[in-house]
Each structure stands twice: as structure tokens, then as C-alpha cells.
Amino acid sequence: MSAGPMTTRDIVLKAENITKQVTSPEGPLTIVRDVSLEIVAGESVAIVGPSGAGKSTLLALLAGLDAPTSGRVWLAGQDLTALDEDGRARLRAERVGFVFQAFHLVPALTALENVSLPLELAGRADARRLALATLDRVGLSARTGHYPRQLSGGEQQRVALARAFVTRPAVLFADEPTGNLDTANGTRVCDLLFELNRDLHTTVVLVSHDQTLAARCTRALHMDDGKLA
Amino acid sequence: MRAAILAVRTLAREWRSGELGVLLLALTIAVAALSAVGFVVSRVGAAVELQASEVLAADLRLVSANPLPETYLDEARRRGLATAGSVGVLSIVFHGDASQLSSLRAVSPGYPLRGTVVVAAETFGAPENAAGGVPPRGEVWPESRLLAAIGAEVGDEVSIGAANFRVGRALVTRPDQGSSFAELAPSLLLNAEDLPATQLLQPGSRARFALLFAGDRDEVEAFKAWIGERKQAGERVLDITESSPQVRDATDRAGRFLSLASLVAVLLCSIAVAMAARRYVQRHLDSVALMKTLGATRAFTLTVSLVQLGLLALIAASVGAAAGFVAQAWLVRALRGLLAVATLPPPSLMPIVMAIVTAFAVLAGFALPPLLQLSRVPAIRVLRRDVGPPPLVIWLAFWPAVIAIVGLIYWVVRDVPLLLGFTAGLAAFVAVLALCGALLVRLTGSLRSRVGVAWRYGIANLARRRAESVVQVVAFGLGIMVLLLLALVRRDLLEDWRASLPADVPNFFFINIPSAERGDFLSFIDDAGAATSRALPMIRGRLTAINDRPIEGLSFDDEGLATREQNLTWTSELGDDNQIVEGGWWRPQDTGQPLVSIATEFRDSVGVKLGDRLTFDIAGETYVVTVASIRQVKWDSFQPNFFLVFPPGLLDATAGTWMTSAYFAPGKPRPIAQLVRRFPSVSVFDMDSILGQVRGVIDKAAVAVQSVFFFTLLAGLTVLLAAVQASRDERRFESAILRTLGASRRTVRAGVLAEFITLGLLAGLLAALGASIGGYLIAKYVLEVKYTFDVWVWVWGLGAGAVLVAGGGWLATRSVVGQSPILTLRGG
Ligand SMILES: Nc1ncnc2c1ncn2[C@@H]1O[C@H](COP(=O)(O)OP(=O)(O)OP(=O)(O)O)[C@@H](O)[C@H]1O
Ligand SMILES: [Mg+2]
């Protein structure tokens, strides 16, 4: 464990002056500017703001999918900026779960195989049993053998939720988890999300345009033009 | 391990998306092409060696004019080699009052170690293989013409030297009888243990002793070296490399040519593999990014793809090698008869190794670079779709492919200059083709405004996917071109052959006609209704000196032609198949003068020129003659011809025999059997069967080469498939949009069909053009025959191109075009 300024044991995610700059045809572009934040275990945080504000980029930086141009990020006690890509991947396999707007299931794998995939990547022996249990939890025990294209959008998102929670991650990141769903299905997925957040004591960081979803979170961070308001 | 399990588990579903199928097909065809040729080459090579061994009746033969010591036999047996002995001696065979000079062969148990002795139950009877090659004691097997000459039958008694023998069978052929005209005396086989009883072997009798050895190749080589250190003066070792070097050279070269031809197919397949691999990468960008998000390392995702492709390579190697094996069985059947060996030895397993290496080399060269690229796609792609892997470094994409192909070429040719030549030639050829292809595609694009909507859509598609279109036109054009070219060359060869042989070309050769019987013989042929050509005397002599320098001290390009006993002739007439290239033909005043006319072959290999003085030993007399003319001889006229021709009046008194040839019209009775009985010493050569064989050789060789190039056509098809696969999603989307805009399913289909027909026509055009130019060049510079323009080349080229490409493309896109637009636009 790296020696970060982990003063409070409960801080599971911490960003310190992170900035993300990219080069575009019109010259350098700063998408995330000097963002610092701390998130405590068990919290649910919503990042909200207008389109193009840099919400998805910030989420990617916090989750270690991308490296910041400057600044540091600690996730579950590890300094992400000190790890290489494969090191971050290993950390993700153990401590992080994801849910995306466009579901992102592996089309070649069944629902059950999709859910057990992260367990297998982390080398867990009881992958199948845990995956079945989690699929049952999201109400899909009857569809375990189905492939993603045989499932509806709501069902696919529930598989994605099961996959995100099956490793009992320290933090769950979600980018517009209900963006592609109708209200009824969206609510159902939200209910599940918070249920799992509560039961498993998982920290949730999500990006959403959905006001009701954001309102159900314990905290909301407002973002505009790359900065937290 | 986890990666491997995942790879296997998803492979079945990956299969459905199509590109793995194309990849597998391309790899399989590449492997099949290379291994089919590899199998054939290995079998034919082994057969040629076997055939060469049969000529020796052994793998190794030690010959001497003196008896050979037992120590050789003991050592050979100690080394586990099979052995046999043979003694050859000339003697008269008597039957009652009739007698005939014969070449006796006394053979010991085991003979022949290679090949078989063929016998008949009666004189000129049906040939059958003798169970063993050695007659039982007290029995001899004379040739039929010997029996005819002395008026004996199977079962009669004959006497040889001091002993009497029963004629057990009639000898048809023995493997080591030699095919040169030198061995003219009819031969007879007897048991070696009977030889002492004949008392023929006296000091000074001219016998030839031989020991025969056969066995495992390495053992034979080691034994040969052992003999080499001990053999005495006058003892000579013969092995298969010496017995027929030309045949081996020719097979080696043909084998290499076929292998290179199959490499063209491999190259095309590699292009298909590269296209399929690219699509594989495109389709897997999302999955790999997702796996990385879920915690997979780069090595893990790379392993998944590598295991999948490795499995495919294994499948392709096995299926391809099996297909190659079946193809070679077929090829070998087509080639049967080209070789004297009745049953070909089984193929070696080397081509299977080759198959596996090929599959992996092609994958490593053409699929690995994009896969390495795939594993670099960043995880962030799950949030931002436009993020792909970093751009491929060009040398990384290019070099593995070049190394793989050049490596394969080297593996086949094993010769650096040839490798460089072939590679450069291939690169230039492909570049020219690609240029032509690009030009054609561009020209077609300008037709766009003049055609209907379906064709416009089709042609627009070709122009838009220009690079792919050019690749397809070239791949297909190449396949069709080589097939057309071969058809042309084969036609030219056969026509040239036919044109050079008038219908009444002599089909029987007679040699060894005694001078005294010449008149009788010629009238016998006349009475039989056949037309004889010129009759020439045949005298044996030996060259002993050139410009008074003994030939022992000289060296020659072709030792044999200078030092062996020659057949000589004299005549006053110059046949029209002979053309004087230097000096002049006999004038009346040259009669009886010490002059000689030589053939260009003799000039070239012995190295003499006009005006040189040659000394000959002819029947014990020495003749010093001056080279007065040099002739270019058309040997394939099937007329009697000689390297050395003397003027009339010089050798007339020398004892010799005569030779002639005759034409027996087909369908008429050929009294050859009566002829042999009446003139037993005359040797008969049936040219009809030889002529037929030559024709057969050309046809069979053409079939073999064409079937190898058939793989090239198949490879072209896989390129088409790969290209169609690559454009599948795009096509699906386009057709959905077109149909949403109100185009009927038929219009969309007509557009697709128009696209492929155009593509096929372009490939056919390229093929016909290339084949015509290639055919012209080959006719003019290689075969040196007149080139005849063949319009069928164009008909076939364009027709085959259009039908094959349109058919293949149509089948491959049918499902895409037929799909309902709703399904497509919803992303199903
Ligand atoms: N690699 C990059 N290169 C160039 N521009 C980028 C890159 N990554 C992000 N951007 C730009 O940065 C801005 C922020 O992007 P981001 O996806 O984070 O926005 P967002 O807040 O998630 O918007 P939305 O609500 O529409 O999803 C956008 O204008 C985007 O085009
Ligand atoms: Mg976003």
C-alpha cells in the first residue's frame, strides 16, 4: 500500500488538483481543470452538469481508466498515478465496478458468463456460484444462459449491474446508467443500484442528467467547463 | 490459462461473425497448396531415386574387369546391407546347329536388389514379373529374340560353353540391361552357381564383374565412402546420382517451380488473412476496451486473441494438410506414367511440418501486427467511442509480412540468388498488376454518369473502396491469368510438336541389320507396305586423339561423348533434317578422302572445330580424319542420325551393320513378329509408344501445373470473401438506408450484382491482357514458335472473371442485402 495522505480511514477516493489536457486540431484543450475531491466509503455521489462539461472525463480519471495530465488520484488507498496501465487494470479487477450508458456487455458471452468475467479475471474460484447469486439478486436467474442480444435494454443493464457488484467492489462508477432506458426501467435499475449500495456498503460515483437519480444520491458535485462549482 | 479458457469459450460465437471463417479458409488453402505440392515433390523425388536405383538393380554397384574380393561382401553384410553379385560375359549360345552371340548374365541370390525381372512363359509371350530374379540351377532365361534366332522354345535344351541348360522362361527385361544401343547382343540370365560348369571364365576372357548393394540410405553412403578408400585400380563405383543426373536435375527444377507456383497462392491467401485480421481487430476494439475496464491486463487480452488465432492455425494446418494430401493423390494419378516406376513410394511427412510452419508464418506475418495493435486499445474507449489504438507504426505492420513471405520463399528454394530473383520479380509483377488494376478501376469510375441507377451504385461502390477493389482485381486477375497462360503455352507446345512431325514420321526403328541381309530386310519392309527412310551403315569406333594429342590427356565438358565407343556412319546424302552450319557437305571428289562431318553437339562437348584432325580407332585400324563440316541435326525427326558422318568410300570395307526407320500406317497389320523371326539379330524400337509418351508428358505436366495454379484461383476467391466480409457492416447499413429511401430489394441487389460483375470483368480483362502478353513472350523467346492470337483467351478471361466474381460476391452478400432495414438500423 502506497503511503498516501490517507488521514481518514474512510476516504476511499481522493483527487488532488487533477487536470486533463488534450491536444486537439485547434491547439491544447483543458477538459478537466484543477479538480480536488474526497469521497468517503459508503457515500453515493452524483456528478452533474451540462453536456460537454467534462463529467465523463473526470469519472474516467477517478476510475483510473485514463491518467491525468497533472495531479494525483488515490483509489482504495492506492496512488493511481504511480501505477502503469496493467497495474491499474489489476486494481480495477479487485476494487472497482462499472456501469455504462450503453450497457457494454461482451456480445460473445452469456449473461452468466458476463457476470462471472470480472471474478475470473481476478482469479476467484467460486465465480460461477457468486455470479448466479448476483444474477438472482437483480431478478434475472431465469435468463442466465441468454446472450446480450436476446435481452431487452433494461435486462441488459441489470446484467451490467450484476457484473459491477459481483466482485463486491469498493467503488462503483456509473456513467449515465439510465440514459438509454425508459422511466420504468430506469427506476428499476436505480432502485437496484441503491439497494446494492446500501446492502454491500459500496461507494457509488455516478454521472447523470437524470434529476431524480441525482437527488437520490447523498451528495451532488456540479461541474461546468471542466471545473467543480 | 484463464485467457485460454475464455478464448476457447468465445471462439464458437466469434465464428458467426464471419471473419474467422475467411481467415481459416485462407490459411487452409495456403497450407493445402503448399503441402499438396510438397507431397508430390517428395514422392516424385523418391520415385526418381528409385527409378535410378532400378537402372543399377541396386543402390550401389561396384564393377570391375577382374573378380572382386569377398571382403566387400563381408563388410556390406556386416553393415546390414543387402548384397548380390553379377557376372557378365559374351558367349555363343547353341541350339542344335543354330547359334547366336549373346550377353550372358550370371546372377547370385538376391538379384535384383532394386527393380524386377520381367519374364514370359513362352517366346514373345505375355510379360509377367518373375518371383525372383535368379533362374533355378540348370535353367536359363534367354530373351525372346535370342530364342527366335536359334529356333528354340521354352523347355528346349541349349548349350553354353561346356554345359547344357533347359530354357525355363523367356526373358523380357531385367532392370540393369541398359538402354543404349551398345548392348545389342540379346541377353540371357543364368544362375551364378552354374557359371563354373560352362568353363567360360578363363584367364583373358572378357568378363564384367559386379557387386550389388542396397539398403538404408545413410548406410549405403557410409559404405560407399568405405569402398572409396579401399578400391583397387579398375574398380568403379556407380550410384544413383551418377546413373541419371539429368532426370534428377529436371525433377528438382520442376519441384521448385511448382513450389514457387504454390507460393503465389500462399501470398494471395496472406492478403485475405490480413484483411480478415483487420476486421477482427475492428470488431474487437470494444470488447478489449471493456475487458481492460474490468481489470484485464494487456497480456491477458493479447493472449485471448493469440490463442484463438493459434487454434485456427492448428485447424487450418491439419485440414489444409489433409486437403493437400488428397490433392496430391489426385495429382499423382494425373502424373502417372511420367515415371517408369509403377508404384510411387509413399510421401514423406515433411510437408506436414511445412503445413504447420506455413500456417503460423502467415499468421505471424499478417495477423500478429494488427493483434498487437488491438491489445493497445485504451480502456477509456468504453466512455469515448472515437478513441482507438495508437496508429500502427508502418514498419511494424510491414516487416513481419515481408519477413514471413521471404522466409517461406527461401524455405522452398534454398538458394539466395533464386530467392532474390523470385522476390524481386514477384514484387515487380504485383506492382505492375496493381498499377493496371488501379488504372482500370479509375477508368471505370468515369463511366458512372452513363449508366442506370443500379450500375451507378455498383460502380460508385468500386470507386469508393478503391484500394480493396484494386486488391481484388489483382488477386483474381492473377489467378485467372496463370490458368489462361498455361492453356496457351500447352496449346503452343502441342502444336509446335505436331507441326514438326509430319503424319508419316517413321514410327519404327531397326538397328543391327547385318550387311548381308540388308537387301532382304528392306524388301521385307516394302512388302509389308511400309515406307522406309534412308538406311545408314552403323560402325563402332573410338576417338583416340585430337590433333595428334591423345584424348587421355585432355579434359572435356562431356567425358562420355569423347571417350566412349561411338556409332559412326558414312553416306553421300545429306538428309533435310541436317543443316550444314560450317564447312561444306561431301563433293564427288571427297569420296574416300579422310574427312568427317560432326554434329554441333559433338563440337560443343568435345570442343573441336573445323579443320581439326581427329584420330579414330575403327575395328582395329587407325584413321586420321579432318573435320570438313559441322551439321545442325534435328534429332526429333525420327530419322537415323549420327554425330559422326564419314564420306563414302572410306569405311565401306569395314564390317558393320545397318539401321533404318520405317513408317507403318495405323490400322494396317504390322508383321513385326515375323520380322523378328526372320531377322533375329535386328533390334526393333517402337516409336509410336515413345511419341505417345511425349504427348502424354506435355499433357500431364500441363495438368499438374494447372492444378497447382487452381489453388491460386481459390486463393483469389478468399481475397474476394475477405473483402466482402470487411465491407459487410457498411453494406448492411447502406442497403438499409437505400431501402428506407424507397429502393426496392431488387434495385439494391442489382446494384450489388453490377458491382461484382464489373469487378469480375476488370479482373478478366487484366487476366486476358496479361496472358496474351505472357503467351506472346513465351512463344517468341522460350518456345520459339509463331504466336497465334487467340480470341478465346479474352472470352474465357472475361467470362470466367464475371461469373466467378459475381457468383462469389453475390453469395457472400446475399444475406446482408436481404435483411430488413428496421433490424439493421436498430443495430441487430
Ligand atoms: N481525447 C479528447 N480529445 C479532444 N477532445 C476531448 C477529448 N476527450 C474529451 N474531449 C472533449 O472534452 C469535452 C468534455 O467531454 P466529456 O465527455 O467529459 O463531457 P460530458 O460532460 O461527459 O458530456 P456529456 O454530458 O455530453 O456526456 C467535450 O467537449 C469533448 O469533446
Ligand atoms: Mg459524458
Image (tube, coloured by chain):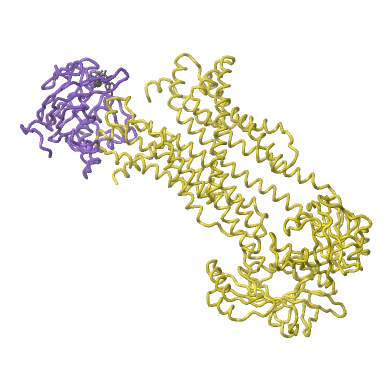
- Residue shown at the point (48%, 33%) measured from the top left: B722
The percent position of residue B33, horizontal first and vertical second, equals 54, 45
Quick one: B651 or B265, which is closer to the camera? B651
* Residue B530 visible in the displayed image: no
Q: Give the color of chain B as drawn.
A: yellow
Residue B555 left/right relative to A106: right
Quick one: B663 or B606, which is closer to the camera? B606
Rendering quarter of residue B676:
bottom right
The percent position of residue B343, horizontal first and vertical second, equals 62, 60
* Residue B676 visible in the displayed image: yes
Quick one: B776 or B421, which is closer to the camera? B421
Rendering quarter of residue B760:
top right
Residue B738 left/right relative to A176: right
Q: Quadrant of ligand 1?
A: top left
Q: Is residue A147 above or below residue A47?
A: below
Q: Give the color of chain A as drawn.
A: purple
